[in-house]
Amino acid sequence: MKKAIFILCLLILAGCKAKKVKPVKKVEKIEILQPLEVEEPIKREEPKTEKIALSGVDLTLKKKAYELGKRMLMTCNTSKFRPYDENEATASVINNITEDRLSKTCANYRQWYGTFKDLELVEIFINNVDQTTVFRYKALYTKKVANKELRVFMNDENKISSLRTLDWVDVYDNQ
């Protein structure tokens, strides 16, 4: 046993052998570089989206976005959908939101989240690229596991250009 401990100590000592240190080369000449001259000032890009205070948007526009978004989600409770007209939505929205699509989506939502109760306006953003106003609502359902959001996109003509439901995330991501 003593021999085994002695051999182990020798191996540890051999493993801790000091390594050779390489000398650092001396720098003889230091060259000073001049900063580059910039002819044009650096242009900063505008942010893609800007957050607006809730009071910074016209009350009628907020009410219109709320009513149109709620009308779509209330379809899940009543099973009756009144289609959007040309004064309320763009042609692509009118063509994409059909009763068949809504009924399939509503079946899943009612199963997972329960009955739709109301919308709560959380944030408003302006997209500087396409000049749309994004209303971000938290959708309230009867089941506690429901954590959904509804985004209503209004174009410069105050028509719905897009409706999107997503899982709720506290930080807005421009998707």
Image: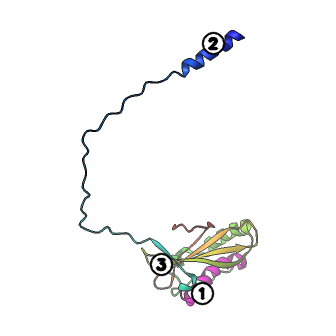
- Which residue is denoted by mark 1 in the rendering? 63
> Is the image coloured rainbow, by chain, by secondary structure, or in one colour?
rainbow
- Marks 2/1: CA–CA distance: 85 Å
- Marks 2/3: CA–CA distance: 78 Å
Q: Mark 2: which amino acid?
A: Ile
Tell me the element at label 3: strand
Q: Position of residue 27 (x, y in %)?
A: 29, 38
What type of secondary structure mainly makes up the magenta span? helix
Q: Position of residue 29 (x, y in %)?
A: 24, 41
Q: Viewer-nearest of labels 2 and 1?
A: 2
> For mark 3, does the 10 Å Cα neighbourhood hold few (<14), some (14 to 19), or many (20 or more) residues?
many
Range drawn in magenta = 57-79
Relative to 94, say whether 28 is above or below: above
Relative to 122, say whether 175 is above or below: above
Q: Which label's residue is closer to the chain start, 2 or 3?
A: 2
Horizontal arrangement in the rendering, residue 71 relative to residue 18 (left or right): right
Residue in the image at 55% along x and 20% along y: 15
